[in-house]
Amino acid sequence: MTDENPFAPPTPRAAVPPANEPTPAAGRPSEPAGAPAQPPAAAEQPTEQLPPQHPAPHQPTAQQRPTQQHQPTQQLPATGYLTTLPAPSAAGHDAHAGAAAHAGTTSHDGNGPHDGATPHGTTPYGTAQPPRSRRGRLGAGAVSAVVLLGLLAGAGGGVGAYALLDSRGGARPADAALPQPAAGTSQVERPEGSVAAIAAAALPSVVSIEVRAPQGVATGSGMILKSEGYILTNNHVVAEAASGADVTVTFSDGHEQPAELVGATPDYDLAVIRVDETGLEPLVLGDSDDVVVGDSVLAVGSPLGLEATVTTGIVSALHRPVKAGESAEAAFIDAIQTDAAINPGNSGGPLVNSAGEVIGINSAIAQGPGTTTATGNIGLGFAIPSNQARHTAEQLIETGSATFPIIGVLLDPSYQGEGVQVSKEAQQGSPAVTPDGPADQAGIKPGDVILSVDGRPVSVADELIVAIRAKAPGDPVTLQVRSGKNEREVRVVLEERSSGQ
């Protein structure tokens, strides 16, 4: 049989005699009797059996080549059949590697190089061939070894592959084992009062709030105020609940509860809602009067819908006059300013100090000049002081509404001088100074200028309103008032007014 069909089973051969020993003619069953003796065959180099190939030009094909009959074939070692093909030359490597890398790729506009091209090879070395040599045929022993290796590789492929890679030395991939920490050295200290400890204590008492109304969905945050299901948040988060919108509360463990509105006040931008659940763990409202600039704080809530988020920072300022909300229902807040990251969705969540006490309710963020919508944290967030939140929340729980203090004057927003000027004339039918109100009783007249409240200077109308609303109805305040060229101090007892009046 010739090698016209390289896949035909090879003819078994007798054992190859030593090279120096003459081979008896009669010992070859395939030779006819009396045939002339053949000279000893030169030592033949073992060749690998290759797939059939197209004949090269000017080269005899397998049928044209003289067949060497009865030529003994050396049995190849078992691993010889699995040896990888030799790497091509540098030029060939670049060409094939480039073809494989770019095959089928396109530019973003679909007109890039090799657009839709068929790969030249499945791997960089897929088309490399060894130098051509005389074809030989594998002996039966080699075929058996190959079949056996195939079976073993199928049964224990991983082990066999790594054993082969080990035998090839540098061809084995690098060991991917990474360094491990030494035993007992990776424990992180989280002492009481650390950020991690404070966050772990606060997070179970912070909730996410969703309000579904016909015009859209509003989301925000809240804190558990009482174990009986009372939750404190911002009025602007749940304002649509007053019109019948559905309110859903999601707790830190993931369970949800519907909530009902207990009471709200746009004047302080605070609201209380309630879920039908008991045994909740409330957060403690601390004393915001003890807060100083530089205190460490944590803001907890659901910014941009990302529940149970904690950010850290410091108190960066106190008594910031903040007007939040629409003009018709604006909230005037004597705010705590913080650089802890606050974003839309943080509204209603707590601002916690290093003792784990709530010192403020996150309510507003600053906007850059010229912007009309909140764009996210820029390092200027504002919180309603906890003392104000406590007083208002108690009123909302007890009566469903809240009150705020007034001095009984209308202010002139167009005034540009020092202090804040009382309007000189009535506005929209309302007198500049309320008859028999706190200011009227203290002798304040239309056109007077108020310079300070309890020694705190005021220069714009919002500052005066915020300074007054930081007090409680019935509290006395001392005003520095200028009438013409004369200045005097007057004592005013603040009057109470309910939200919506």
Image (cartoon, helix red, strand yellow):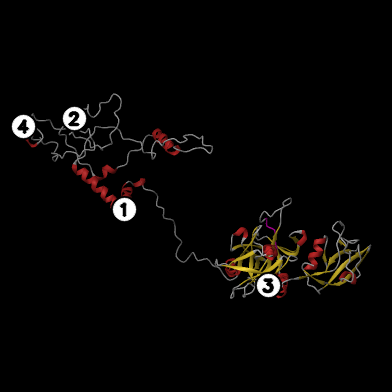
Q: Report if the CB atoms under discs 3 and 2 are less than 8 Å apart.
A: no
Res. 381 visible in picture: no
Mark number for residue 33?
Answer: 4
The magenta segment is 378-382
Among the 4 quarters of the image, the one containing residue 435: bottom right
Looking at the image, is mark 1 or mark 3 nearer the viewer?
3
Q: Residue at point 41% right, 34% down?
A: 95
Mark 3 — residue? Answer: 286
Residue at position x 85%, y 70% in the image:
478
Q: Measure the alpha-carbon separation of dots 1 and 2.
A: 41 Å
In magenta segment, residue 249: no
Which callout, 1 or 2, points at the residue further toward the start of the chain? Answer: 2
Does any portion of residue 248 appear in the rendered image? yes
Residue projecting furthest to the left: 34
Q: Give the crowd class for mark 4: few <14, some 14-19, many >=20 residues within 10 Å.
A: few
Q: Amino acid at mark 2?
A: Thr
Q: Where's residue 149, x and y in %?
A: 25, 48
Label 3: how many Cα within 10 Å (few below 14, some 14–19, many 20+)? many
The earlier-in-sequence mark between 1 and 4 is 4
Q: Residues within 10 Å of mark 1 (few under 14, many from 20)?
A: few
Q: Which residue is mark 1?
A: 159
**Residue 302 occupies which quadrant of the picture?**
bottom right
Label number found at residue 67:
2
Element on which disc 1 rests: helix
